[in-house]
Amino acid sequence: MSKHQANNPLHGITLEQIVNSLVAHYGWSALGKRINIRCFNSNPSVKSSLKFLRKTPWARKKVENLYIAMQK
């Protein structure tokens, strides 16, 4: 099991940390252009984004993929 997690670039990183890092790097406006979802474009906040992303697997996957790409 630990071998599986060793290859996981998101291991130990919370969704809140991911969203905060993306906002710090891109800002809400640019983040909304990269991933066109309402929680990033209309009255954005970390709390509302987390609520939406936890309920919506396809959007969460896009956010996680953008975070991984940003780290490279």
Image: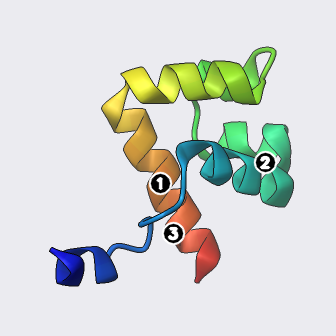
Residue plotted at (54% across, 50% down) = 14
Is residue 1 or residue 58 the one in the foreground? 1
Task: Give the residue displayed 66% in from the left and 18% down from the top.
Answer: 48
Rendered-image quadrant of the N terminus: bottom left
The spot of residue 71 in percent (x, y) is 61, 76
The three-letter code of the residue at mark 2 reads Val
| Residue with the mark numbered 2 | 23
> Distance from label 2 to label 3 (Cα)?
14 Å
Residue 56 got which mark?
A: none
Location of mark 3 (residue): 68
Taking the spot 48% from the left edge, 29% from the top edge, the residue there is: 53
Mark closer to the chain start, 2 or 3: 2
Q: Amino acid at mark 1?
A: Glu
Q: Earlier in the sequence, mark 1 or mark 2?
A: 2
Residue kind at label 3, given as amino acid type: Ile
Q: Is residue 24 left or right of residue 13?
A: right
Q: Position of residue 38 (x, y in %)?
A: 62, 19
In this view, 58 is above or below 25: above
Disc 1 target residue: 64
Contact, mark 3 vs mark 1 (Cβ under 8 Å):
yes
User: Is residue 9 among what the camera can see?
Assistant: yes
- Farthest-out residue, left: 1
